[in-house]
Amino acid sequence: MKKLLLPLLLFSLKLSAQNAQQVHQKAILIDTHNDVFSNQLINRFDLAKRQTEGNFDLVRAREGGLDAQIFSIWCGEKYGKGTAFAMANREIDSLYALIGRNPNKIALVRNSAELKEAVKQKKLAALIGVEGGHMIEDRMDYIDSLAKRGMRYLTLTWNNSTSWATSARDEVTKKDSLPHLGLTDYGRQIVHHLNELGVMVDVSHVGERTFYDVLAATSKPVIASHSCAYTLDPFRRNLKDDQLKALAKNGGVVCVNFYSGFVDSTYTAKVLAFLQQHKTEVDSLVKIYHDNDLANIRLNAIYKTESDKLRPPLSMLIHHIDYIVKLIGVDHVGIGSDFDGSESFPLGMDSVSDYLK
Ligand SMILES: [Zn+2]
């Protein structure tokens, strides 16, 4: 009996792998969150060529069967009035330059018809998402300007709150000292304006209060461009079951984040010990990159063998996808890798080339 079972099992595994490949090739694979352009200003990698560092380039995107990528336009909270909007535009310039140099490989798209056309022409369909409300510097005309350049979603906050919306981090850590909680009237006006322009409202990073305020204010479905399930990893900006259900009721989509810290609840403690151990190098890297996240990405690359030991198994990431699909249905679940925006991903998920593995 055992002898029979093994070939049967192998046969069915082979079949399911083949099916997975077929489904993968047939489907349009969209990743709703990649931060490569916030690193690009520092690293200056030619993203048309295969790179040995980082998670994205056009060669590996093709290998992984990636059809559409929403590129996150992001800068940290030290940027603000007078600097953040300019930084957003510099990153968009970098994307435009990549497209200009490689018109046969990548195209900027603004809607589903253009996206399908780019996929048909075997080009990567590139879309723009702006991550962090601070990048609009409280100005409606800056929203219009970014929308004209291709912005298809605005993540209302990053980890830092704006004067009109509170973030997940601040709602948890500064609750009593916050000048306001959730969306202000101006925040509601911003949501309405985004709705009118057809720019998606992204609720990844926003606090729970802002999340529900947004759902009450929006006339369109929203997106959580890179978030995981709080029940499986109670990190403050993962989404609780009630939030996931409310998002589905709104017609929205949650795109599951691959970051080890949002997938595996034991990761953060392990990585803090790792950073402490390499504190001197971290301090020098922060001086070079002027940003903790970018410094951590570099440190993980330098100490790859060591940092690999901190990564969760791929099955944990799949579990988040399965869990949310079972809770709210497959129509409401997508992929938002956070590649190039985080220092660690589950084992086997090293770059955009790994979607097919
Ligand atoms: Zn993010």
Image (spheres, helix red, strand yellow):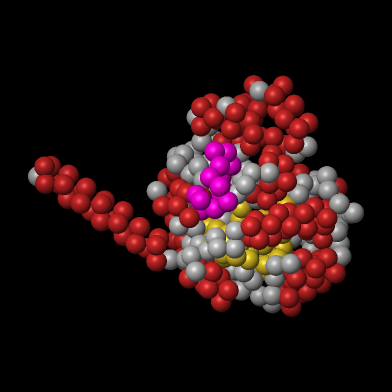
**Residue 228 in the figure: left or right of residue 132:** left
- Percent position of residue 14, x then y: 25, 52
Instruction: Please tell me which residue lies in front, 43 or 46.
Output: 46
- Which quadrant holds the N terminus? top left
Residue 230: image x %, image y %? Answer: 58, 50
In the rendered view, tell whether residue 273 sits above or below residue 182.
above
Position of residue 87 measured from the top left corner of the image (x, y, whole percent): 80, 52
Specify whether residue 236 is painted magenta.
Answer: no
Residue appearing at x 31%, y 53% in the figure: 17
Residue at x 16% of width, y 47% of height: 7
| Region rendered in magenta | 48-61
Between residues 8 and 122, which one lies in front from this camera angle?
A: 122
Residue beneath the point at 64% across and 49% down: 36
Asked whether 311 or 217 is in front, the reply is: 311
Q: Does residue 244 appear in the picture of this structure?
A: no
Using the image, determine if residue 169 lies above or below residue 271.
below
Does 51 lie within the magenta span?
yes
Q: Quadrant of residue 348?
A: top left
Magenta: main secondary structure: loop
